[in-house]
Image (cartoon, helix red, strand yellow):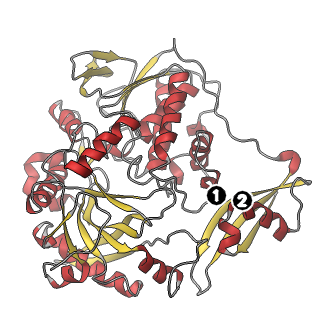
């Protein structure tokens, strides 16, 4: 096998009808000949004035061409049972891996399936009605289904990234997620993909219950043996995988009441910043007007170390959504939370990104009596303040960027992608002073790094507060809770992941840990036994 890097024009790299033939042509090879060309990484290089695309390819003998990955899902209808709480990427991929290992998963999801869930999202956007059980965070597919679908992760040590992408492709995702440097599916494509994952689980004999809330974890002789539903009905199994996502506050409170060990952890809070996409394109692609039509909407990644009251704090961009929309991500009435998403074409005229400030346990002293829940209550108070100041609906507080730096309430606001509407508010009245001060330092620095970024054409929309879980549920090297055997904290809600792919990998790891604890000898090699490169 040989590895070659090619430099292509945007048209050659991003027009599907040209891409494959150009690779063979540039390498002096014939399609269908003695070798096969497989792209393994495609990335945009915009460092020079002329934007190019770099493509790394593997040249493989045709008789060694790898076949498309197809996991083997066995029939588990009559197999031993494991309960999974939550059907986000951690829960879904834990279920798929359990099936591969011959174990029957039973998924319990408080929210609705992806189709029914759309009505709950419409109610938030149009009528400002928040269903606390089914919303942008809760429901089939988890928070990522309707808030973007980016698949980029740095968590390579957690598992096999390529395997996760292959499973997604096998269930309907585009082929190019295998090799794009920052793979993305899009909120308009993800629901069908999530349905396909669900159908695989059901066809193999797994069970999934929607609109079904867990209110207790059943423990016998120090071991988790199932869950109790809001109806009072118990569902039992040989283990419980807890994959509830980063916003299931009632689950953290349940664990705390039951004296099951949990810990406060650092997270980040800030705002969503929305620019015209054309402005970001001009900055990133060095173009005077609109970008090359073959290039995707441009993105950015920014970081700065601010110093506030002698303490250094990271200020950084988070979940940048080119060609996207800002969405209401509250999980209860009386709070305002914003997040970002992009459709697969990334064709909105807006670019938005979270710009957030790191917060840690010393910042939660007001809620110190809450112990491990102190960060969660600190987070919730900011969300309630945002809601109250903006009118006690899902209208979000907003301020133009330069006005924010100058401490001036904006006379008018820019057009926005945020459907419930914006209210002109001084965001310093919403955010704690240390967060506002750090944001100001960060924005000034970002304006130096990206000339044109710091402008009143952009505005801040608050609050971006669900960057990650404010609570960690500890676990041992065997991935079980240190106090409760058979309880497997998993994914973002447990504090062990930070996105779709890393949560999916963590779900697979937990499934394998369950398999080992049940003394099941699988037909397939366990991924956790393969050394990570």
To which residue does mark 1 refer?
179
**Where on the picture, by quarter, is residue 449?**
bottom left
The residue positioned 9% from the left and 53% from the top of the image is 367
**Disc 1 element:** loop
Q: Which mark is residue 191?
A: none
**Where on the picture, by quarter, is residue 315?**
bottom left
Q: Is residue 108 above or below residue 293?
A: above
Q: Is residue 476 above or below residue 336?
A: above
Whether label 1 touches label 2, CB < 8 Å? yes
**Disc 2 element:** strand
Image x and y of residue 230, in percent: 21, 23
Q: Nearer the viewer, residue 458 or 417?
A: 417
Image x and y of residue 235, in percent: 32, 17
Q: Is residue 368 above or below residue 399?
A: above
Image x and y of residue 387, in percent: 13, 57
Q: Would you call the spot at circle 1 few (<14 residues within 10 Å), some (14-19), or many (20 or more)?
A: some
Q: CA distance from mark 1 to mark 2?
A: 6 Å
Image x and y of residue 33, in percent: 91, 54
Q: What is the residue that sits farthest to the top in this orientation? A: 78
Q: Is residue 382 visible?
A: yes
Q: Nearer the viewer, residue 241 or 466?
A: 466
The residue positioned 58% from the left and 27% from the top of the image is 100
Q: Is residue 235 above or below residue 97?
A: above
The residue positioned 23% from the left and 57% from the top of the image is 420
First in sequence, mark 1 or 2: give its number.
2
Q: Nearer the viewer, residue 128 or 14?
A: 128
Q: Is residue 218 visible?
A: no
**415 displayed left or right of 145:** left
To which residue does mark 2 refer?
39
**26 displayed left or right of 412:** right
């Amino acid at each position: 096998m040989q590895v070659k890097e090619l430099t292509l024009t945007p048209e050659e790299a991003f027009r599907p009808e040209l891409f494959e033939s150009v690779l063979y042509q540039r390498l002096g090879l014939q399609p269908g000949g003695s070798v096969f060309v497989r792209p393994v990484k495609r990335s945009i290089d915009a460092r020079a004035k002329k934007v190019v695309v770099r493509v790394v390819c593997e040249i493989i003998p045709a008789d060694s061409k790898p076949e498309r990955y197809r996991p083997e899902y066995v029939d588990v209808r009559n197999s031993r049972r494991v309960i999974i709480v939550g059907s986000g990427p951690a829960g879904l991929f834990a279920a798929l891996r359990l099936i591969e290992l011959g174990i029957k998963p039973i998924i319990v999801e408080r929210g609705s399936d992806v189709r029914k869930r759309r009505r709950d999202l419409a109610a938030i956007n149009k009528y400002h009605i928040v269903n606390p059980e089914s919303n942008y965070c809760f429901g089939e597919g988890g928070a990522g289904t309707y808030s973007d679908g980016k698949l980029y992760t740095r968590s390579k040590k957690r598992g096999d990234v390529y395997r996760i992408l292959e499973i997604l492709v096998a269930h309907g995702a585009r082929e190019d997620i295998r090799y794009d440097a920052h793979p993305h599916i899009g909120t308009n494509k993800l629901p069908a993909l999530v349905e396909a994952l669900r159908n695989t689980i059901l066809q193999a004999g797994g069970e999934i219950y929607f609109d079904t809330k867990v209110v207790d974890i059943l423990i016998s002789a120090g071991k988790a043996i199932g869950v109790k539903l809001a109806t009072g009905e118990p569902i039992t199994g040989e283990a419980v995988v807890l994959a509830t996502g980063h916003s299931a506050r009632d689950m953290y409170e349940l664990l705390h009441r039951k004296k099951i060990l949990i810990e406060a952890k650092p997270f980040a809070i800030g705002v969503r910043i929305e620019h015209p996409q054309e402005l970001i394109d001009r900055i990133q692609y060095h173009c005077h007007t609109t970008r090359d039509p073959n290039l995707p909407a441009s993105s950015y990644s920014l970081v700065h170390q601010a110093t506030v009251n002698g303490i250094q704090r990271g200020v950084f961009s988070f979940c940048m959504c080119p060609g996207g929309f800002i969405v209401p991500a509250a999980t209860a009435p009386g709070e305002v939370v914003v997040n970002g998403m992009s459709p697969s074409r990334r064709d909105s005229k807006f670019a938005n990104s979270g710009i957030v400030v790191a917060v840690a346990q010393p910042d939660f002293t007001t809620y110190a009596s809450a112990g491990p829940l102190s960060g969660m209550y600190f987070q919730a108070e900011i969300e309630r303040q945002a809601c109250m100041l903006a009118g006690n609906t899902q209208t979000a507080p907003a301020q133009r960027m330069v006005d924010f730096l100058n401490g001036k309430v904006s006379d008018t606001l820019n057009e926005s992608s945020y459907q419930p509407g914006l209210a002109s508010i001084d965001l310093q009245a919403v955010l704690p002073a240390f967060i506002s001060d750090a944001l100001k330092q960060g924005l000034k620095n970002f304006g130096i790094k990206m000339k044109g970024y710091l402008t009143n054409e952009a505005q801040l929309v608050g609050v971006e507060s669900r960057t990650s879980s404010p609570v960690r549920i500890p676990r041992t090297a065997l991935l079980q809770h240190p106090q409760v055997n058979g309880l497997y904290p998993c994914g973002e809600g447990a504090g062990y992941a930070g996105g779709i792919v890393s949560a999916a990998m963590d779900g697979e790891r937990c499934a394998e840990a369950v398999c080992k604890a049940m003394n099941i000898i699988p037909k397939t090699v366990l991924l956790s036994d393969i050394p990570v490169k």
